[in-house]
């Protein structure tokens, strides 16, 4: 008897460059999961178009994200990498789920509230429906685990509610899914260390995965730290120490931590050490990404093959669902 590997699935939206927080929070983790589970990692294209975007850039963003997946170590021989938009079954299942999801539940979603405040001129139906599409993404492949950040937990709870509503109405079919929360550091903005690292403040707030060493150095030079005389480690300095613990050595972290505590710290020295550590760790990634992007045909073929694999499962689920609900 062969034991079937458990299934893991997750998606990332193609919205431009990724930053270190995305790397530590998801990509690094994905690369570790692919050895242990049957993994599906996809590009959540249809989610990404619920906010304003430039159509002529979208295809490149998709290829960029696929290249980033590959450069971060995802191996198409071990996991299935695909573009959500290549699997029409996903939007079909989302439609079916729409008919069993009360809109009041969607209005409760904190991400919807945040995004509608931020994009007040474009509160489209897709933005509200976003978590239903996410439930379809997930349940189509019947995964055991879904690795996500804390901000997605509410969406996963909704997916499980959809499982319950569906099963109650049509008979037990879907199994509830489990989030896979990994211990990941919460990186803060370089310029506003009381806020999470994100792209919304502008490029100097974060370090992008594709930043060249000089850019990393410049951004860190500007990073907010402290005066060197505080009794408690200031948030900005804490953030740099956390980065150093991810990208540098324990010895370096101990050295700078002690220096902050006994008030002999030279922040310029910490920043210099950290720049070098990050630039060196990312060098192979940057090189691989560049190489891949110079040959988009190869990326296209990874996505095409991934979609072929994903489609097999997606078709089977959708066929069963359509029969269960009585439409086919
Ligand atoms: N909403 C997720 C995010 O912004 C992306 C996503 C879409 C996703 N579909 C998914 C994540 C399915 C996990 C599973 O991070």
Image: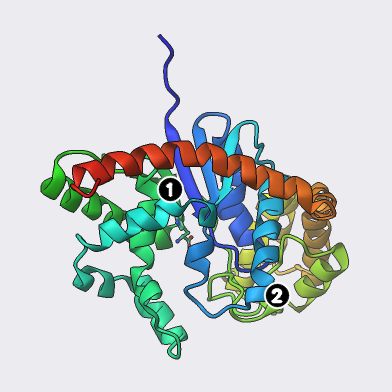
Q: How far apart are marks 2 and 1 (CA)?
A: 35 Å
Quadrant holding the N terminus: top left
> Which residue is tagged 2?
228
Query: Horizontally, is 260 left or right of 8 in the view?
Result: right
Q: Tell me the crowding category of disc 1: few under 14, some 14 to 19, or many 20 or more residues within 10 angstroms, Cα based.
A: some
- First in sequence, mark 2 or 1: give its number: 1
Q: Where is residue 14 in the image (x, y as percent from the top left)?
A: 60, 63
Q: Which of 149 and 2 is in front in this view?
A: 2
Q: Can residue 269 be seen in this view?
A: yes
Q: Nearer the viewer, residue 42 or 145?
A: 42
Indicate the quadrant where residue 316 lies.
top left
Q: Residue furthest bottom?
A: 121
Q: What element carries label 2?
A: loop
Residue under the point 75% across and 68% down: 265
**Which of the numbered marks, if any, corresponds to residue 19?**
none
Residue under the point 52% across and 68% down: 48
Q: Can residue 258 be seen in this view?
A: no
Q: What element carries label 1?
A: loop
> Which residue is tagged 1?
181
Indicate the quadrant where residue 65 lies.
bottom right
Residue under the point 45% across and 25% down: 5
Colour scheme of this structure image? Answer: rainbow
Query: Horizontally, is 121 left or right of 163 in the view?
Result: right
Q: Where is residue 197 in the image (x, y as percent from the top left)?
A: 59, 70
Q: Which of 158 and 76 is in front in this view?
A: 76
């Amino acid at each position: 008897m062969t034991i079937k590997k458990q299934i893991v699935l997750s998606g990332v939206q193609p919205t431009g460059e990724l930053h270190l927080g995305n790397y530590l929070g998801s990509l690094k983790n994905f690369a570790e999961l692919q050895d242990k589970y049957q993994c599906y990692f996809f590009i959540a294209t249809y989610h990404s178009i619920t906010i304003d975007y430039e159509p002529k850039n979208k295809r490149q963003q998709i290829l960029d994200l696929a290249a980033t997946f590959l450069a971060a170590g995802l191996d198409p021989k071990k996991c299935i990498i695909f573009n959500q938009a290549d699997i029409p079954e996903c939007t079909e299942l989302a439609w079916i789920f729409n008919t069993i999801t009360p809109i009041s539940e969607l209005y409760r979603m904190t991400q919807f509230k945040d995004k509608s405040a931020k994009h007040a001129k474009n509160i489209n139906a897709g933005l509200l429906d976003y978590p239903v599409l996410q439930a379809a993404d997930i349940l189509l492949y019947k995964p055991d685990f879904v690795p996500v950040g804390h901000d997605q937990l509410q969406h996963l709870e909704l997916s499980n509610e959809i499982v319950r509503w569906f099963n109650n109405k049509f008979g037990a079919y879907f199994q509830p899914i489990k989030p896979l929360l990994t211990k990941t550091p919460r990186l803060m903005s370089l310029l506003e260390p009381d806020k999470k690292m994100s792209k919304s403040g502008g490029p100097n707030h974060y370090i992008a995965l594709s930043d060249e060493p000089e850019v990393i150095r410049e951004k860190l030079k500007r990073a907010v730290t402290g005066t060197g005389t505080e009794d408690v480690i200031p948030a900005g300095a804490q953030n740099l120490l956390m980065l150093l613990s991810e990208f540098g050595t324990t010895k370096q972290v101990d050295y700078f931590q002690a220096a902050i505590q006994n008030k002999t710290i030279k922040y310029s020295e910490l920043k210099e050490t950290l720049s070098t550590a990050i630039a060196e760790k990312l060098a192979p990634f940057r090189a691989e990404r560049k190489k891949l992007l110079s040959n988009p045909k190869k990326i296209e073929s990874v996505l095409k093959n991934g979609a072929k694999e994903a489609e097999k499962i997606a078709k089977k689920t959708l066929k069963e669902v359509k029969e269960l609900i009585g439409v086919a």
